[in-house]
Amino acid sequence: MRAGADRGSRGGGVVHLPNAFGASTPALGMKETAPMKSLVLFGILAVFLAGLTPVASAADGTTLTGHVLCAKCTLKKADAGHCQNVLVVTDQDGKTSEYYIAKNDVSEHFGHVCKGDKAAVVTGQIEEKDGKMWITPSKMEEEK
Ligand SMILES: [Cu+2]
């Protein structure tokens, strides 16, 4: 009799399986971003290759001049969970725009500006993501 009860509980375990599959559905949704990533990578590669020919230098994106500083340590952004470079551009009217700098080889080479700020000229592709402006740099130079 007890064995039967055990089987019954095991049966219950099997019933939980569809739930497990249900839980894996968001994961499948996540996988859909993988082709997107490869598209982005392909885009970066295309930009990189285009950069080899001087004529196509406009494909590098927009060039912005401003100051690089840390979103967390300097701008004290409440939603900044970790150190993040931000390019602050001040226009002729004194209005500032913030461009979050995406991490890649170019920004890694430039280095993180945790304290103070660094005047810089940044060239890259600009896109809006999560209500913020992001720049994926193809070129970053400190302005002296
Ligand atoms: Cu910092």
Image (tube, rainbow, N blue to C red):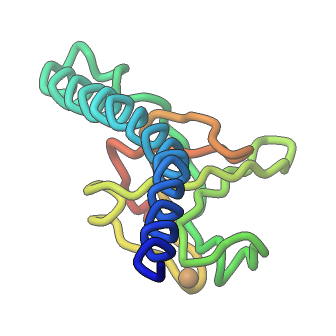
Q: Is residue 127 left or right of residue 29?
A: right
Residue 9 against residue 17 in the figure, above or below:
below
Residue 127 against residue 132 in the figure, above or below:
above
Quadrant in the rendering for residue 36: top left
- Image quarter hosting the C terminus: bottom left
Q: Is residue 42 left or right of residue 121?
A: left
Name the outermost residue toward the top: 55
Q: Residue at x 51, y 75 (%)?
A: 5
Q: Position of residue 18 (x, y in %)?
A: 50, 47
Q: Residue at x 52, y 58 (%)?
A: 16
Q: Residue at x 65, y 78 (%)?
A: 72
Judging depth in this view, the residue of 120 and 17 nearest the camera is 17
Q: Residue at x 27, y 32 (%)?
A: 38
Residue 29 against residue 76 in the figure, above or below:
above
Judging depth in this view, the residue of 74 and 122 nearest the camera is 74
Judging depth in this view, the residue of 142 and 111 nearest the camera is 111
Q: Quadrant of ligand 1?
A: bottom right
Q: Position of residue 94 (x, y in %)?
A: 84, 50
Instruction: Tally the numbered discs.
Output: 0
Q: Position of residue 114 (x, y in %)?
A: 53, 82
